[in-house]
């Protein structure tokens, strides 16, 4: 089931008469393809959860339309939209067993939509099998781990056979190892069911690892929509470049002169096609190459060996971010006691941004 959002806007009135309205979602215009998993990504307060609540019907839009396939559902209540919703806090009924929690949505259906008891049991067992919780059906939520509770919540959402599955920060209450395991399970379940899924998260690693497309939002405005790797490799502006990436992108204050990029007094890269002027410069941590003859000389602060990679912490007079960090292969050894380090740069990992608007400045055909 494709989801079409047509110029969707949600405006919340100001709390006092003199204040301005808050625009939580601003002119969101996008078609979510049938059967795909879409990650809504952004910092707290960016509007991603509001967008999810508009899709499911918990909030009414101030303007714009929402279509499921060819059906306009903008005015439909949530229970008539055919959505399955999984919350951050699972929202399981503590006094009911896993079996009864999963059956609950079916038991509340009325009329022709209500399956027989045998059909309910069959659908419940199929969903339990899908999320691999069959041995837990007679337990209550307090007897389950966080990951198991999350699987129950997903099974309860799927048992209604929704047209759309909506996941609101579903992994934020889990520890790191369990988050990794559960997000892999979510991706497996989505592929097996083929249900169109919208996954809201502030964790860019989660979004990039399981999404077919990611939507990066900030202050209610969609910044960029594309495949995860494309957004990482080709950020449209400085916000997107800074938000995606672990460790985060390194920022410098630089200037372009005669087709060359300068950080301080050091000419570090040829940037054909870029206009002369002051720019912000972003360099991905993997964009540095250890090079004794490299053009970028820096003060070495620390070397952190992390197994397969080595993290080099350094400083530079043109630094514009809180810290600078390069990631190099562990095979490249750093000599103990060194106080300086030199790098050459990978052009594909260097980004120029307008100092005022933050818009990407292209150079060299990239």
Image (cartoon, rainbow, N blue to C red):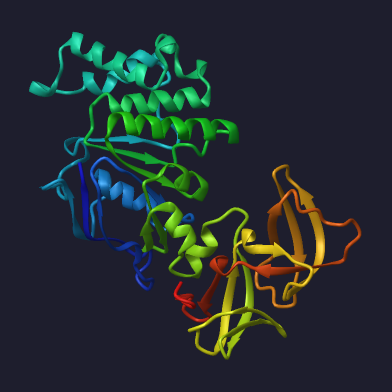
Question: Which quarter of the rendered picture does the N terminus lie within?
Answer: top left
Residue 37 image-quadrant placement? top left
When asked about the image quadrant of residue 288, the answer is bottom right
Count of marks placed on residues = 0
Nearest the eye: 166 or 342: 342
Give the answer, above or below, for where 121 lies relative to 363. above
Residue under the image location 43 percent in, 68 percent down: 236
Q: Is residue 182 above or below residue 226?
A: above
Q: Residue at x 73, y 54 (%)?
A: 311
Residue 231 sits in which quadrant?
bottom left
Tell me where residue 20 appears, x and y as whole percent.
Answer: 36, 71
Percent across and percent down for residue 353 are 51, 76
Taking depth in this image into account, of 58 and 41 the one nearest to the observer is 41
Residue 159 shown left or right of residue 139 in the figure: left
Q: Position of residue 201 (x, y in %)?
A: 45, 47
The structure residue drawn at horizontal position 19% and vertical position 8%, both measured from the top left corner, is 118
Q: Is residue 96 in sight in this rendering?
A: no
Q: Nearer the viewer, residue 67 or 298?
A: 298
| Residue 301 on image: x %, y % | 82, 62
Q: Is residue 169 visible?
A: yes
Identify the residue shown where x is 73% and y is 45%.
306
């Amino acid at each position: 089931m494709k989801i079409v959002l047509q110029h969707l806007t949600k405006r919340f009135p100001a709390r006092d008469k003199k204040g301005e309205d808050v625009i939580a979602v601003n002119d969101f215009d996008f078609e979510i393809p049938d059967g795909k998993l879409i990650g809504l990504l952004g910092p707290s307060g960016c509007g991603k959860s509001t967008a999810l609540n508009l899709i499911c019907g918990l909030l009414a839009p101030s303007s714009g339309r929402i279509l499921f396939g060819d059906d306009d559902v903008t005015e439909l209540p949530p229970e008539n939209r055919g959505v399955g919703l999984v919350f951050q806090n699972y929202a399981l009924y503590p006094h009911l067993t896993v079996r009864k929690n999963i059956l609950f949505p079916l038991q509340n259906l009325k009329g022709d939509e209500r399956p027989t008891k045998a059909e309910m049991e069959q659908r419940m067992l199929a969903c339990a099998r899908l999320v691999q919780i069959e041995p837990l059906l007679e337990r209550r939520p307090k007897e389950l781990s966080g990951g198991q509770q999350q699987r129950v919540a997903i099974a309860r959402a799927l048992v209604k056979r929704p047209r759309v599955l909506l996941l609101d920060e579903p992994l934020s209450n889990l520890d790191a190892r369990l988050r990794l395991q559960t997000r892999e399970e979510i991706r497996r379940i989505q592929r097996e069911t083929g249900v169109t899924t919208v996954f809201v998260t502030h964790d860019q690693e989660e979004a990039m690892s399981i999404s077919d497309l990611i939507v990066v939002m900030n202050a209610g405005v969609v910044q960029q929509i594309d495949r995860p790797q494309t957004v990482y490799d080709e950020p449209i502006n400085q916000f997107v470049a800074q938000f995606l990436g672990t460790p985060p992108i390194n920022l410098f204050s630089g200037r372009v002169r005669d087709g060359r990029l300068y950080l301080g007094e050091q000419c570090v890269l040829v940037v054909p096609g870029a206009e002369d002027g002051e720019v912000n410069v972003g360099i991905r941590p993997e964009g540095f190459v250890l090079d004794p003859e490299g053009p970028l000389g820096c003060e070495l602060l620390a070397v952190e060996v992390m197994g397969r990679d080595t993290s080099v912490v350094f400083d530079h007079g043109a630094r514009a971010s809180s810290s600078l960090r390069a990631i190099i292969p562990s095979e490249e050894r750093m000599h103990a006691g060194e106080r300086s380090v030199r790098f050459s740069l990978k052009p594909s990992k260097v980004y120029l941004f307008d100092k005022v608007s933050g818009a990407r400045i292209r150079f060299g055909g990239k």
